[in-house]
Amino acid sequence: MTHTAVSRDTFDEVMVPNYNPPAIIPVRGEGSRLWDQQGREYIDFAGGIAVNVLGHRHPALVKTLKDQADKVWHLSNVFTNEPALELARKLTGRTFADQVFFCNSGAEANEAAFKLARKYAHDHQGAGKHEIIAFNQAFHGRTLFTVSVGGQAKYREGFEPVPAGISHVPYNDIEALRNAISERTCAVVMEPVQGEGGVVPADPEFARAVRELCDEHQALLIFDEVQTGVGRTGSLYAYEALGVTPDILTTAKALGGGFPIGAMPTRREIAKSLNIGSHGTTYGGNPLGCAVAKAVLDIVDDPELLDGVKRKQQLFVEQLEAINQRHHCFREIRSAGLLIGAELAENLQGQAPKFLAAARDLGLMLLVAGPNVLRMTPSLIIPDEDIRAGMALLDQAVARVLEVENCA
Ligand SMILES: *Cc1c(COP(=O)(O)O)cnc(C)c1O
């Protein structure tokens, strides 16, 4: 078990250094537990960054993938395939959308959405209507177009020149958007809850006002639900609970439950602008990804499972509040279903990575959202006892970090 041909050192040797993984390498997962090369066990509150909605190795997903692997893996979009059509039928049946474009990731879904918004405006009102408005701190992916629309300048630095016609305004600030939007705006893009930006939910009145401003200026409203979609917030898509319907939706991460897939559902009238040959991808909508995603949606789109998300959210928040009572380590605990952020107290600003490392040393996988927020995006079916056990480890991790802080 301990002898393995590859280790963390291999990473520095042969991988481009854009990531900085810890020393341990997980090799196996089951439910909300992971095991590393040495056989050490971890409780998984990270869920592959809001991806493993049904945990690791869910039997129905494993079976679906194996069954499809025995039929056909890949055809390209020269042909259509049954799993893609079945998944599209499911997605359009369960959302406002009439038609779907499939791709392989969140960034690709957003890339398609931004291109479509420009093309639609171009088709109907001419090239002048091309501006996209997004929000500060927003995250939409890492392609050049999506980092340009994203609201974090550090992801664009060094990659200039970036595409033009994009502006940013503060999130949850309707006056700022009112001042920025114009007849040149083709789309406004927002996350219903900013995920990477620190787990910041949209105020419902703000979301409604964004919809109204878009309608007044004939701009499309794009909801980036790459992180919030597929049950994460307690409804299949977060827009349902907000009571605001976008024109274009983007979904990925949890959609494949760990198998790479992205999708862009939209209305037929808008979809028309992606006419034959205007956009495409080789792998997008491949049978393996679509078969698994259909199985994920069939399981997640269940009132009982979604009620469970709300109940588990409460358990997470109660436990975090109890930790905060003991250690006074958090300034605010924010959550939308099982997208949970605990913002560190003033005296601990910038220290989130230390908490992450301490938790991992004790056997708990967490995430950060920026330097000040501990983020948790566990499986939507994580057992309550794993939540309690993980929180006991987090309590110890917080105690350890604070001990070191106080001695320093
Ligand atoms: C993760 C994320 C993306 C990018 O998705 P990738 O699959 O990494 O390309 C886009 N938008 C949001 C809101 C995300 O959380």
Image (cartoon, rainbow, N blue to C red):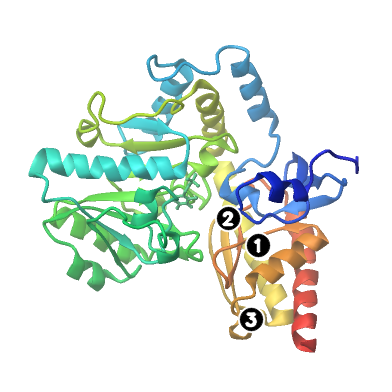
Asked whether, in this view, residue 109 is left or right of residue 217, the answer is right
Q: Assess whether mark 3 and mark 2 are in contact (beta carbons under 8 angstroms).
A: no
Q: Viewer-nearest of labels 3 and 1?
A: 3
Q: Assess whether mark 2 and mark 1 are in contact (beta carbons under 8 angstroms).
A: yes
Q: Which residue is mark 2?
A: 338
Q: The residue under label 1 is which amino acid type?
A: Phe
List x then y, in percent, for residue 276: 24, 23
Q: Which residue is mark 3?
A: 348
Q: Residues within 10 Å of mark 2 (few under 14, many from 20)?
A: many
Q: Which residue is mark 1?
A: 316
- The residue at 33%/39% (across/down) is 112
**Label located before the other in sequence (3 or 1):** 1
Q: Dividing the picture into quarters, in which one does residue 285 lie?
A: top left
List x then y, in percent, for residue 401: 76, 76
Secondary structure beneath dot 3 equals helix
Image height of 139 relative to 51, above or below: below
Secondary structure beneath dot 2 equals loop
- The residue at 80%/62% (across/down) is 361
Q: The residue under label 3 is which amino acid type?
A: Leu
**Label located before the other in sequence (1 or 2):** 1
Q: Which quadrant is the N terminus positioned in?
A: top right
Give the alpha-carbon distance from disc 3 to disc 1, as whole Å.
Answer: 21 Å
Image height of 79 relative to 387, above or below: above
